[in-house]
Image (tube, helix red, strand yellow):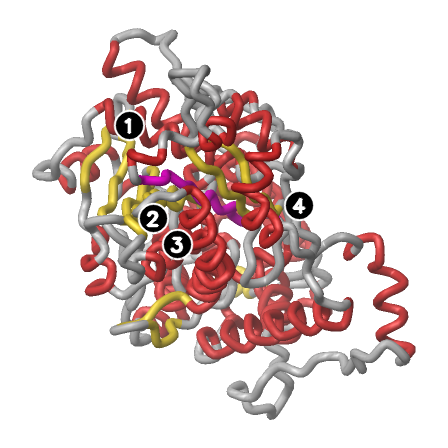
Amino acid sequence: LPYEQDHSISDHAMKALCLSYWFILILTAAVSSAQSSAGVATAECDSNGECATDIRDDKKEAGIFDPIGQLSGQISNFLKDSIFNQQEGSDSSDSPTFPKLDPTEGSDAFQKLIDTGRKFFDGFVTDSVVENQQNNTQLEKIFGSVMSVSSSKSSRSMEEVWQLFSTFFRNSLSQFQAHFKDVNFEHFNILSVWYFIELMDEQKNPSWKRRQHRFHKAVPIDAIEELHDALYLSQLAYAGSVEIIEDGLKKFLNNSFKLVYARTEGLPGEPGHFIAIKKERATDKKKLDPLSVLGLKKAEEDVLDVIIVVRGTKEIGDMLSDTLLDAIDFREGVSHSGVSKSGEWLAAEHLERLSSLLEVSKRKKLKLTTIGHSLGAGAAAVAAMHFNDEHWIDVSSIGFGCPAVLDLPQSLAVQDYIVTVITDSDIVPRLSGAVMVNSLLDIMSYDWTSKALEDIKLTAEWLNLPNKDGIIKWVGELMEKNDKPFFHEFAGKKRMDQLLYPPGNCIHVFRDGGGFQATYTPCSFFDSIDLSRTMVEDHLIPTGYHRAFLELLRDNRKDYGADFDHDLMALNV
Protein backbone atom coordinates (compact mmCIF):
# COMPACT_ATOMS: atom_id res chain seq x y z
CA LEU A 1 0.00 0.00 0.00
CA PRO A 2 1.29 3.50 -0.73
CA TYR A 3 2.24 5.29 2.47
CA GLU A 4 0.84 8.80 2.80
CA GLN A 5 2.48 11.20 5.20
CA ASP A 6 -0.76 12.48 6.66
CA HIS A 7 -2.16 9.07 7.52
CA SER A 8 -1.35 7.29 10.74
CA ILE A 9 0.59 4.03 10.82
CA SER A 10 -2.29 2.37 12.65
CA ASP A 11 -4.61 3.51 9.86
CA HIS A 12 -2.45 1.80 7.23
CA ALA A 13 -2.19 -1.35 9.32
CA MET A 14 -5.96 -1.58 9.57
CA LYS A 15 -6.32 -0.93 5.84
CA ALA A 16 -3.87 -3.71 5.09
CA LEU A 17 -5.74 -6.07 7.41
CA CYS A 18 -9.12 -5.23 5.91
CA LEU A 19 -7.97 -5.47 2.29
CA SER A 20 -6.28 -8.80 2.96
CA TYR A 21 -9.39 -10.00 4.69
CA TRP A 22 -11.70 -8.93 1.85
CA PHE A 23 -9.43 -10.50 -0.76
CA ILE A 24 -9.69 -13.81 1.09
CA LEU A 25 -13.43 -13.45 1.49
CA ILE A 26 -14.03 -12.59 -2.17
CA LEU A 27 -11.76 -15.43 -3.22
CA THR A 28 -13.82 -17.72 -1.03
CA ALA A 29 -17.00 -16.41 -2.59
CA ALA A 30 -15.60 -16.99 -6.07
CA VAL A 31 -14.59 -20.57 -5.17
CA SER A 32 -18.00 -21.15 -3.66
CA SER A 33 -19.67 -19.80 -6.78
CA ALA A 34 -17.61 -22.09 -9.00
CA GLN A 35 -18.34 -25.08 -6.79
CA SER A 36 -22.03 -24.25 -6.84
CA SER A 37 -22.08 -24.48 -10.63
CA ALA A 38 -20.20 -27.79 -10.33
CA GLY A 39 -22.93 -29.22 -8.12
CA VAL A 40 -21.27 -28.79 -4.73
CA ALA A 41 -24.09 -26.50 -3.60
CA THR A 42 -27.73 -26.89 -4.56
CA ALA A 43 -30.14 -24.28 -5.91
CA GLU A 44 -33.73 -24.00 -4.85
CA CYS A 45 -36.17 -22.02 -7.04
CA ASP A 46 -39.56 -20.72 -6.04
CA SER A 47 -42.68 -20.45 -8.20
CA ASN A 48 -41.55 -17.08 -9.53
CA GLY A 49 -38.38 -18.55 -10.90
CA GLU A 50 -36.08 -16.86 -8.34
CA CYS A 51 -33.32 -19.13 -7.10
CA ALA A 52 -31.19 -19.02 -3.95
CA THR A 53 -27.92 -20.86 -3.47
CA ASP A 54 -27.84 -23.14 -0.44
CA ILE A 55 -24.54 -22.77 1.38
CA ARG A 56 -23.83 -26.03 3.17
CA ASP A 57 -22.93 -26.03 6.84
CA ASP A 58 -20.34 -28.71 6.17
CA LYS A 59 -17.72 -26.40 4.70
CA LYS A 60 -15.07 -29.09 4.52
CA GLU A 61 -17.24 -31.19 2.25
CA ALA A 62 -17.97 -28.17 0.08
CA GLY A 63 -14.25 -27.41 -0.16
CA ILE A 64 -14.54 -23.88 1.27
CA PHE A 65 -13.64 -22.22 4.53
CA ASP A 66 -15.15 -19.49 6.70
CA PRO A 67 -12.52 -16.78 7.25
CA ILE A 68 -14.77 -14.83 9.62
CA GLY A 69 -15.27 -17.85 11.84
CA GLN A 70 -11.62 -18.84 11.70
CA LEU A 71 -10.33 -15.37 12.54
CA SER A 72 -12.80 -14.94 15.38
CA GLY A 73 -12.03 -18.42 16.66
CA GLN A 74 -8.30 -17.80 16.66
CA ILE A 75 -8.70 -14.57 18.61
CA SER A 76 -11.12 -16.24 21.02
CA ASN A 77 -8.72 -19.15 21.62
CA PHE A 78 -5.80 -16.78 22.13
CA LEU A 79 -7.68 -14.68 24.67
CA LYS A 80 -9.05 -17.68 26.54
CA ASP A 81 -6.03 -19.97 26.45
CA SER A 82 -3.01 -17.67 26.25
CA ILE A 83 -4.19 -14.86 28.51
CA PHE A 84 -7.03 -16.02 30.69
CA ASN A 85 -6.20 -19.74 30.66
CA GLN A 86 -9.90 -20.67 30.64
CA GLN A 87 -9.96 -24.41 30.20
CA GLU A 88 -13.04 -26.51 29.49
CA GLY A 89 -15.08 -26.74 32.69
CA SER A 90 -12.76 -24.51 34.69
CA ASP A 91 -13.93 -21.72 36.93
CA SER A 92 -13.03 -18.45 35.20
CA SER A 93 -12.72 -16.75 38.55
CA ASP A 94 -9.75 -18.91 39.49
CA SER A 95 -6.28 -17.45 39.25
CA PRO A 96 -4.41 -18.20 36.01
CA THR A 97 -2.01 -21.11 36.08
CA PHE A 98 1.70 -20.56 35.44
CA PRO A 99 4.72 -22.73 34.87
CA LYS A 100 6.19 -23.55 38.25
CA LEU A 101 9.70 -22.26 38.70
CA ASP A 102 11.60 -22.76 41.90
CA PRO A 103 13.23 -19.35 42.36
CA THR A 104 16.26 -20.56 44.26
CA GLU A 105 19.84 -20.24 43.24
CA GLY A 106 20.32 -24.02 43.17
CA SER A 107 17.33 -25.05 41.08
CA ASP A 108 17.80 -26.05 37.44
CA ALA A 109 14.82 -24.02 36.28
CA PHE A 110 16.04 -20.86 37.94
CA GLN A 111 19.59 -21.41 36.74
CA LYS A 112 18.35 -21.69 33.14
CA LEU A 113 16.49 -18.43 33.60
CA ILE A 114 19.65 -16.79 34.91
CA ASP A 115 21.84 -18.19 32.13
CA THR A 116 19.55 -17.13 29.29
CA GLY A 117 18.60 -13.76 30.76
CA ARG A 118 21.78 -12.63 32.46
CA LYS A 119 22.67 -10.15 29.75
CA PHE A 120 19.18 -8.65 29.94
CA PHE A 121 19.27 -8.35 33.72
CA ASP A 122 22.90 -7.23 34.11
CA GLY A 123 22.82 -3.82 35.73
CA PHE A 124 19.02 -3.76 35.46
CA VAL A 125 18.43 -2.46 38.96
CA THR A 126 21.60 -0.42 39.22
CA ASP A 127 20.97 3.26 39.83
CA SER A 128 22.81 5.50 37.38
CA VAL A 129 23.99 8.38 39.53
CA VAL A 130 25.75 11.57 38.59
CA GLU A 131 29.08 11.76 40.33
CA ASN A 132 30.48 15.09 41.52
CA GLN A 133 33.16 16.02 39.00
CA GLN A 134 34.17 19.20 40.79
CA ASN A 135 37.07 19.14 43.21
CA ASN A 136 35.93 22.12 45.21
CA THR A 137 36.06 21.10 48.86
CA GLN A 138 33.21 23.41 49.83
CA LEU A 139 30.96 21.77 47.25
CA GLU A 140 31.88 18.32 48.51
CA LYS A 141 31.23 19.39 52.07
CA ILE A 142 27.77 20.78 51.26
CA PHE A 143 26.58 18.19 48.79
CA GLY A 144 28.43 15.08 49.86
CA SER A 145 25.80 13.82 52.30
CA VAL A 146 23.07 14.00 49.69
CA MET A 147 25.20 12.37 47.04
CA SER A 148 26.06 9.51 49.37
CA VAL A 149 22.37 8.76 49.75
CA SER A 150 21.69 8.83 46.02
CA SER A 151 24.80 6.79 45.24
CA SER A 152 23.62 3.75 47.17
CA LYS A 153 23.22 0.73 44.91
CA SER A 154 20.25 -1.56 44.90
CA SER A 155 20.79 -4.58 47.12
CA ARG A 156 18.38 -6.81 45.22
CA SER A 157 19.55 -10.22 44.18
CA MET A 158 18.55 -11.81 40.89
CA GLU A 159 16.06 -13.91 42.82
CA GLU A 160 14.40 -10.78 44.21
CA VAL A 161 14.20 -9.21 40.76
CA TRP A 162 12.58 -12.37 39.41
CA GLN A 163 10.10 -12.42 42.27
CA LEU A 164 9.19 -8.77 41.65
CA PHE A 165 8.51 -9.38 37.97
CA SER A 166 6.66 -12.61 38.70
CA THR A 167 4.39 -10.96 41.28
CA PHE A 168 3.47 -8.07 38.99
CA PHE A 169 2.91 -10.44 36.06
CA ARG A 170 0.62 -12.71 38.04
CA ASN A 171 -1.34 -9.78 39.42
CA SER A 172 -1.71 -8.25 35.96
CA LEU A 173 -3.13 -11.42 34.45
CA SER A 174 -5.43 -11.98 37.41
CA GLN A 175 -6.83 -8.47 37.06
CA PHE A 176 -7.33 -8.88 33.32
CA GLN A 177 -9.15 -12.12 33.94
CA ALA A 178 -11.36 -10.53 36.59
CA HIS A 179 -12.34 -7.69 34.27
CA PHE A 180 -13.03 -9.76 31.16
CA LYS A 181 -14.29 -13.05 32.60
CA ASP A 182 -17.91 -12.31 31.59
CA VAL A 183 -17.05 -11.25 28.03
CA ASN A 184 -17.58 -13.98 25.43
CA PHE A 185 -14.83 -13.60 22.84
CA GLU A 186 -16.07 -16.48 20.72
CA HIS A 187 -18.05 -14.14 18.47
CA PHE A 188 -15.58 -11.25 18.46
CA ASN A 189 -14.62 -10.15 14.95
CA ILE A 190 -11.53 -8.00 14.55
CA LEU A 191 -13.15 -6.06 11.70
CA SER A 192 -15.69 -4.62 14.14
CA VAL A 193 -12.88 -2.50 15.61
CA TRP A 194 -12.16 -0.89 12.24
CA TYR A 195 -15.81 -0.11 11.54
CA PHE A 196 -16.45 1.16 15.07
CA ILE A 197 -13.52 3.58 14.66
CA GLU A 198 -15.16 4.76 11.44
CA LEU A 199 -18.42 5.30 13.33
CA MET A 200 -16.64 7.33 16.03
CA ASP A 201 -14.93 9.43 13.35
CA GLU A 202 -18.36 10.30 11.98
CA GLN A 203 -19.88 11.12 15.37
CA LYS A 204 -16.99 12.80 17.22
CA ASN A 205 -15.93 15.02 14.33
CA PRO A 206 -14.36 18.50 14.69
CA SER A 207 -17.78 20.16 14.81
CA TRP A 208 -18.76 17.92 17.73
CA LYS A 209 -15.50 18.74 19.52
CA ARG A 210 -15.95 22.49 19.07
CA ARG A 211 -19.48 22.22 20.46
CA GLN A 212 -18.32 20.27 23.52
CA HIS A 213 -15.65 22.89 24.34
CA ARG A 214 -17.65 25.99 23.40
CA PHE A 215 -17.96 27.31 26.96
CA HIS A 216 -14.57 26.17 28.27
CA LYS A 217 -11.87 28.73 28.99
CA ALA A 218 -9.08 28.91 26.42
CA VAL A 219 -5.48 28.28 27.49
CA PRO A 220 -3.24 31.31 26.73
CA ILE A 221 -0.25 30.79 24.47
CA ASP A 222 2.27 31.78 27.18
CA ALA A 223 0.96 28.88 29.27
CA ILE A 224 1.46 26.57 26.28
CA GLU A 225 5.08 27.72 26.02
CA GLU A 226 5.66 26.97 29.71
CA LEU A 227 4.02 23.58 29.30
CA HIS A 228 6.37 22.85 26.40
CA ASP A 229 9.32 23.43 28.74
CA ALA A 230 7.95 20.65 30.95
CA LEU A 231 7.32 18.51 27.86
CA TYR A 232 11.00 18.87 26.93
CA LEU A 233 11.98 17.48 30.34
CA SER A 234 9.46 14.65 29.99
CA GLN A 235 11.09 13.62 26.72
CA LEU A 236 14.54 13.90 28.30
CA ALA A 237 13.51 11.39 30.99
CA TYR A 238 13.44 8.67 28.31
CA ALA A 239 17.22 9.05 27.85
CA GLY A 240 19.24 5.88 28.22
CA SER A 241 22.25 7.39 29.98
CA VAL A 242 23.17 10.02 32.55
CA GLU A 243 25.36 11.79 29.98
CA ILE A 244 22.40 12.42 27.68
CA ILE A 245 20.34 13.80 30.58
CA GLU A 246 23.18 16.10 31.61
CA ASP A 247 23.61 17.32 28.05
CA GLY A 248 19.88 17.94 27.70
CA LEU A 249 19.78 19.97 30.92
CA LYS A 250 22.66 22.13 29.71
CA LYS A 251 20.46 23.18 26.78
CA PHE A 252 17.46 23.87 29.01
CA LEU A 253 16.72 27.40 30.28
CA ASN A 254 20.31 28.55 29.81
CA ASN A 255 21.77 25.67 31.79
CA SER A 256 19.82 26.68 34.90
CA PHE A 257 19.42 23.18 36.40
CA LYS A 258 21.98 20.83 37.91
CA LEU A 259 21.44 17.07 37.79
CA VAL A 260 21.85 15.47 41.22
CA TYR A 261 20.30 12.03 40.72
CA ALA A 262 19.32 9.86 37.79
CA ARG A 263 17.98 6.36 37.41
CA THR A 264 17.80 5.33 33.78
CA GLU A 265 16.35 1.86 34.32
CA GLY A 266 12.99 0.86 35.71
CA LEU A 267 11.36 -2.06 37.46
CA PRO A 268 7.69 -2.90 38.02
CA GLY A 269 6.37 -0.19 40.33
CA GLU A 270 9.70 1.68 40.17
CA PRO A 271 9.89 3.92 37.08
CA GLY A 272 13.06 5.56 35.81
CA HIS A 273 13.46 9.24 36.71
CA PHE A 274 15.91 12.03 37.45
CA ILE A 275 16.19 14.88 39.97
CA ALA A 276 17.65 18.32 39.29
CA ILE A 277 18.00 21.52 41.32
CA LYS A 278 17.75 25.05 40.01
CA LYS A 279 20.95 27.06 40.10
CA GLU A 280 22.01 30.65 39.55
CA ARG A 281 25.45 32.06 38.90
CA ALA A 282 26.89 34.24 41.63
CA THR A 283 26.65 37.97 40.90
CA ASP A 284 29.65 38.84 43.05
CA LYS A 285 32.49 36.47 42.25
CA LYS A 286 34.83 38.11 44.79
CA LYS A 287 32.59 36.90 47.60
CA LEU A 288 32.39 33.28 46.69
CA ASP A 289 29.44 31.74 48.49
CA PRO A 290 29.74 27.92 48.74
CA LEU A 291 26.20 27.75 47.43
CA SER A 292 27.31 29.72 44.40
CA VAL A 293 29.94 27.13 43.66
CA LEU A 294 27.22 24.56 43.85
CA GLY A 295 25.20 26.72 41.48
CA LEU A 296 22.34 27.37 43.88
CA LYS A 297 20.68 30.69 44.48
CA LYS A 298 21.78 32.64 47.55
CA ALA A 299 20.61 31.16 50.83
CA GLU A 300 18.75 34.29 51.91
CA GLU A 301 16.19 33.64 49.20
CA ASP A 302 14.95 30.82 51.45
CA VAL A 303 13.53 28.60 48.68
CA LEU A 304 15.19 25.67 46.96
CA ASP A 305 13.75 24.76 43.53
CA VAL A 306 13.80 21.03 42.72
CA ILE A 307 12.32 19.04 39.85
CA ILE A 308 11.63 15.31 39.71
CA VAL A 309 11.02 14.12 36.15
CA VAL A 310 9.57 10.63 35.77
CA ARG A 311 9.87 8.49 32.67
CA GLY A 312 6.86 6.91 30.98
CA THR A 313 6.54 3.36 29.68
CA LYS A 314 9.76 2.16 28.07
CA GLU A 315 10.55 -1.31 29.41
CA ILE A 316 8.64 -4.46 30.26
CA GLY A 317 8.67 -3.52 33.94
CA ASP A 318 6.83 -0.29 33.11
CA MET A 319 4.27 -2.23 31.08
CA LEU A 320 3.54 -4.46 34.06
CA SER A 321 2.86 -1.35 36.14
CA ASP A 322 0.47 -0.10 33.44
CA THR A 323 -1.50 -3.34 33.35
CA LEU A 324 -2.36 -3.41 37.06
CA LEU A 325 -5.79 -1.97 36.24
CA ASP A 326 -7.71 -2.52 39.46
CA ALA A 327 -9.06 0.48 41.33
CA ILE A 328 -7.63 -0.02 44.81
CA ASP A 329 -8.31 1.88 48.04
CA PHE A 330 -6.29 5.08 48.15
CA ARG A 331 -6.70 7.77 50.79
CA GLU A 332 -10.35 8.84 50.75
CA GLY A 333 -11.20 7.01 47.53
CA VAL A 334 -9.60 4.74 44.94
CA SER A 335 -6.71 4.87 42.48
CA HIS A 336 -5.11 2.92 39.62
CA SER A 337 -3.26 0.03 41.26
CA GLY A 338 -0.04 0.00 39.20
CA VAL A 339 0.33 3.76 38.86
CA SER A 340 -0.33 4.50 42.52
CA LYS A 341 2.26 1.89 43.55
CA SER A 342 4.80 3.68 41.33
CA GLY A 343 3.97 7.08 42.82
CA GLU A 344 4.06 5.83 46.39
CA TRP A 345 7.45 4.22 45.79
CA LEU A 346 8.75 7.46 44.28
CA ALA A 347 7.70 9.52 47.30
CA ALA A 348 9.07 7.01 49.80
CA GLU A 349 12.33 6.72 47.86
CA HIS A 350 13.07 10.46 47.86
CA LEU A 351 11.41 12.07 50.88
CA GLU A 352 14.48 11.63 53.07
CA ARG A 353 16.74 12.65 50.19
CA LEU A 354 14.80 15.89 49.65
CA SER A 355 14.93 16.61 53.37
CA SER A 356 18.71 16.21 53.31
CA LEU A 357 18.93 18.41 50.25
CA LEU A 358 16.95 21.17 51.96
CA GLU A 359 19.09 20.88 55.08
CA VAL A 360 22.44 21.26 53.34
CA SER A 361 21.12 24.12 51.19
CA LYS A 362 20.23 26.10 54.36
CA ARG A 363 16.83 26.99 52.92
CA LYS A 364 13.53 27.13 54.77
CA LYS A 365 11.28 25.69 52.09
CA LEU A 366 11.57 23.37 49.13
CA LYS A 367 9.66 24.18 45.94
CA LEU A 368 9.14 20.86 44.17
CA THR A 369 7.76 20.24 40.68
CA THR A 370 7.06 16.68 39.57
CA ILE A 371 6.81 16.16 35.81
CA GLY A 372 6.12 13.17 33.60
CA HIS A 373 4.53 11.63 30.53
CA SER A 374 2.19 8.62 30.47
CA LEU A 375 3.00 6.27 33.36
CA GLY A 376 5.49 8.91 34.53
CA ALA A 377 2.74 11.53 34.68
CA GLY A 378 0.58 9.30 36.87
CA ALA A 379 3.45 8.41 39.18
CA ALA A 380 4.45 12.09 39.39
CA ALA A 381 0.87 13.08 40.32
CA VAL A 382 0.53 10.43 43.04
CA ALA A 383 3.98 11.29 44.40
CA ALA A 384 2.98 14.97 44.47
CA MET A 385 -0.03 14.08 46.63
CA HIS A 386 2.29 12.43 49.16
CA PHE A 387 4.83 15.27 49.06
CA ASN A 388 1.99 17.75 49.57
CA ASP A 389 1.47 16.29 53.04
CA GLU A 390 4.84 17.73 54.11
CA HIS A 391 4.64 21.31 55.43
CA TRP A 392 8.13 22.15 54.20
CA ILE A 393 7.41 21.20 50.57
CA ASP A 394 5.52 23.45 48.17
CA VAL A 395 4.64 20.99 45.41
CA SER A 396 3.10 21.16 41.93
CA SER A 397 2.83 18.56 39.19
CA ILE A 398 2.56 18.66 35.39
CA GLY A 399 1.62 15.54 33.46
CA PHE A 400 1.16 14.73 29.77
CA GLY A 401 -1.09 11.84 28.78
CA CYS A 402 -1.56 10.89 32.43
CA PRO A 403 -3.51 7.65 32.96
CA ALA A 404 -6.92 7.63 34.61
CA VAL A 405 -5.51 7.34 38.11
CA LEU A 406 -7.93 8.87 40.66
CA ASP A 407 -11.62 8.78 41.44
CA LEU A 408 -13.45 11.99 40.51
CA PRO A 409 -13.66 13.59 44.02
CA GLN A 410 -9.92 13.13 44.58
CA SER A 411 -9.17 14.39 41.07
CA LEU A 412 -11.13 17.59 41.79
CA ALA A 413 -9.43 17.95 45.19
CA VAL A 414 -5.93 18.27 43.68
CA GLN A 415 -6.78 20.86 41.01
CA ASP A 416 -4.77 23.52 42.85
CA TYR A 417 -1.43 21.82 42.28
CA ILE A 418 -1.78 19.13 39.59
CA VAL A 419 -2.20 19.85 35.86
CA THR A 420 -2.89 17.14 33.28
CA VAL A 421 -2.56 17.85 29.55
CA ILE A 422 -4.40 15.60 27.08
CA THR A 423 -3.95 15.74 23.32
CA ASP A 424 -7.12 15.17 21.30
CA SER A 425 -7.96 11.42 21.25
CA ASP A 426 -5.06 10.22 23.44
CA ILE A 427 -6.23 6.79 24.65
CA VAL A 428 -4.25 6.54 27.90
CA PRO A 429 -5.99 9.23 30.04
CA ARG A 430 -9.33 7.58 29.22
CA LEU A 431 -8.16 4.02 29.88
CA SER A 432 -9.14 1.91 32.88
CA GLY A 433 -10.34 -1.63 33.38
CA ALA A 434 -14.01 -0.58 33.35
CA VAL A 435 -13.57 1.58 30.23
CA MET A 436 -11.80 -1.25 28.40
CA VAL A 437 -14.66 -3.66 29.10
CA ASN A 438 -17.33 -1.08 28.18
CA SER A 439 -15.56 -0.14 24.96
CA LEU A 440 -15.19 -3.77 23.96
CA LEU A 441 -18.90 -4.39 24.52
CA ASP A 442 -19.74 -1.27 22.50
CA ILE A 443 -17.58 -2.55 19.64
CA MET A 444 -19.06 -6.05 19.76
CA SER A 445 -22.65 -4.73 19.78
CA TYR A 446 -22.18 -2.46 16.74
CA ASP A 447 -23.76 -3.81 13.54
CA TRP A 448 -21.07 -3.13 10.97
CA THR A 449 -22.30 -5.52 8.27
CA SER A 450 -23.81 -2.87 5.96
CA LYS A 451 -20.51 -0.98 5.82
CA ALA A 452 -18.68 -4.26 5.23
CA LEU A 453 -20.91 -5.02 2.24
CA GLU A 454 -20.10 -1.58 0.82
CA ASP A 455 -16.39 -2.43 1.03
CA ILE A 456 -16.97 -5.83 -0.56
CA LYS A 457 -18.78 -4.17 -3.44
CA LEU A 458 -16.03 -1.57 -3.96
CA THR A 459 -13.31 -4.22 -3.79
CA ALA A 460 -15.11 -6.50 -6.24
CA GLU A 461 -15.53 -3.58 -8.67
CA TRP A 462 -11.87 -2.65 -8.29
CA LEU A 463 -10.87 -6.24 -9.13
CA ASN A 464 -13.39 -6.23 -12.00
CA LEU A 465 -14.75 -9.60 -10.91
CA PRO A 466 -17.66 -11.27 -12.70
CA ASN A 467 -20.83 -12.13 -10.78
CA LYS A 468 -20.38 -9.23 -8.31
CA ASP A 469 -23.98 -9.46 -7.16
CA GLY A 470 -23.57 -13.16 -6.38
CA ILE A 471 -20.46 -12.49 -4.34
CA ILE A 472 -22.12 -9.70 -2.35
CA LYS A 473 -25.16 -11.88 -1.74
CA TRP A 474 -23.01 -14.79 -0.53
CA VAL A 475 -21.04 -12.58 1.88
CA GLY A 476 -24.25 -11.00 3.14
CA GLU A 477 -25.74 -14.40 3.91
CA LEU A 478 -22.55 -15.45 5.68
CA MET A 479 -22.54 -12.38 7.95
CA GLU A 480 -26.28 -12.71 8.52
CA LYS A 481 -25.63 -16.18 9.91
CA ASN A 482 -22.29 -15.74 11.72
CA ASP A 483 -22.34 -12.16 13.04
CA LYS A 484 -25.73 -10.46 13.16
CA PRO A 485 -27.36 -12.77 15.74
CA PHE A 486 -24.88 -11.68 18.42
CA PHE A 487 -24.97 -7.87 18.13
CA HIS A 488 -28.13 -7.63 20.23
CA GLU A 489 -26.66 -9.98 22.84
CA PHE A 490 -23.67 -7.71 23.45
CA ALA A 491 -25.81 -4.55 23.40
CA GLY A 492 -27.86 -5.90 26.30
CA LYS A 493 -24.90 -6.57 28.59
CA LYS A 494 -24.55 -4.27 31.58
CA ARG A 495 -21.68 -1.80 31.42
CA MET A 496 -19.26 -1.28 34.31
CA ASP A 497 -19.18 1.91 36.38
CA GLN A 498 -16.32 4.23 35.52
CA LEU A 499 -14.29 4.90 38.68
CA LEU A 500 -11.03 6.51 37.54
CA TYR A 501 -10.22 9.80 35.81
CA PRO A 502 -7.10 11.82 34.96
CA PRO A 503 -6.07 13.97 37.93
CA GLY A 504 -6.28 17.67 38.69
CA ASN A 505 -6.87 20.57 36.35
CA CYS A 506 -7.22 19.08 32.86
CA ILE A 507 -6.22 20.82 29.64
CA HIS A 508 -7.55 19.36 26.40
CA VAL A 509 -5.70 20.17 23.18
CA PHE A 510 -8.05 19.08 20.41
CA ARG A 511 -8.41 19.22 16.63
CA ASP A 512 -11.03 21.76 15.62
CA GLY A 513 -11.07 21.06 11.89
CA GLY A 514 -8.58 23.76 10.93
CA GLY A 515 -5.88 23.22 13.52
CA PHE A 516 -5.76 22.81 17.29
CA GLN A 517 -7.42 24.55 20.21
CA ALA A 518 -6.61 24.22 23.92
CA THR A 519 -9.15 24.66 26.72
CA TYR A 520 -9.40 23.97 30.42
CA THR A 521 -11.74 20.98 30.38
CA PRO A 522 -13.38 19.08 33.27
CA CYS A 523 -11.58 15.78 33.82
CA SER A 524 -14.98 14.04 33.86
CA PHE A 525 -15.05 14.67 30.09
CA PHE A 526 -12.56 11.83 29.65
CA ASP A 527 -14.83 9.02 30.82
CA SER A 528 -14.70 6.88 27.67
CA ILE A 529 -12.21 5.98 24.95
CA ASP A 530 -12.19 8.03 21.77
CA LEU A 531 -11.61 5.18 19.34
CA SER A 532 -9.80 7.11 16.63
CA ARG A 533 -7.10 6.47 14.05
CA THR A 534 -4.87 8.88 15.99
CA MET A 535 -5.54 7.61 19.53
CA VAL A 536 -2.05 6.08 19.84
CA GLU A 537 -0.14 8.79 17.96
CA ASP A 538 -1.85 11.46 20.06
CA HIS A 539 -0.36 9.84 23.17
CA LEU A 540 3.25 10.01 21.99
CA ILE A 541 5.33 13.11 22.66
CA PRO A 542 6.68 13.83 19.13
CA THR A 543 3.55 13.00 17.11
CA GLY A 544 1.02 14.06 19.73
CA TYR A 545 1.95 16.68 22.32
CA HIS A 546 4.86 18.42 20.62
CA ARG A 547 3.06 18.46 17.29
CA ALA A 548 -0.10 19.97 18.82
CA PHE A 549 1.81 22.56 20.85
CA LEU A 550 3.84 23.59 17.82
CA GLU A 551 0.74 24.09 15.70
CA LEU A 552 -0.88 26.14 18.47
CA LEU A 553 2.22 28.34 18.70
CA ARG A 554 2.44 28.93 14.94
CA ASP A 555 -1.27 29.63 14.52
CA ASN A 556 -1.21 32.08 17.42
CA ARG A 557 1.81 33.96 16.10
CA LYS A 558 0.78 33.66 12.46
CA ASP A 559 4.36 32.57 11.90
CA TYR A 560 4.54 29.08 10.42
CA GLY A 561 8.29 28.86 10.90
CA ALA A 562 8.08 29.63 14.62
CA ASP A 563 9.50 27.13 17.09
CA PHE A 564 9.99 26.69 20.82
CA ASP A 565 13.18 27.60 22.65
CA HIS A 566 13.99 23.96 23.37
CA ASP A 567 14.20 21.45 20.54
CA LEU A 568 12.99 18.21 22.09
CA MET A 569 13.14 16.50 18.69
CA ALA A 570 16.93 16.88 18.82
CA LEU A 571 17.21 14.91 22.07
CA ASN A 572 19.00 11.60 21.68
CA VAL A 573 16.35 9.42 23.36
Give the structural element (helix, strand or loop) at label 2.
loop
Task: Give, as a three-letter code, the residue at label 2.
Answer: Asp
Task: Give, as a three-letter code, the residue at label 3.
Answer: Pro
* Vertical comparison of 230 with 479: above or below: above
Q: Please give the range of residues in magenta.
A: 303-314
* Vertical comparison of 266 with 421: above or below: below
Task: Give, as a three-letter code, the residue at label 1.
Answer: Ile
Q: Which of marks 4 and 1 is nearer the N terminus?
A: 4
Q: Residue 548: x and y, percent?
A: 36, 28
Task: Give, as a three-letter code, the residue at label 4.
Answer: Ser
The tag on residue 224 is 1
State how far apart marks 2 and 1 are (Cα): 23 Å
Residue under the image location 63 percent in, 39 percent down: 130
Quadrant in the picture for the C terminus: top right
Give the structural element (helix, strand or loop) at label 3.
loop
State how far apart marks 3 and 4 are (Cα): 27 Å
Tell me, yes or no, whether the highlighted magenta stretch contains residue 24: no
The tag on residue 530 is 2
Q: Are marks 2 and 4 in contact (CB under 8 Å)?
A: no
**Residue 551 shows in this picture:** yes
The residue to which callout 4 is attached is 128
Give the structural element (helix, strand or loop) at label 4.
loop
* Vertical comparison of 98 with 207: above or below: below
Residue under the image location 18 percent in, 40 percent down: 520
State how far apart marks 2 and 3 are (Cα): 14 Å
State how far apart marks 2 and 4 are (Cα): 38 Å
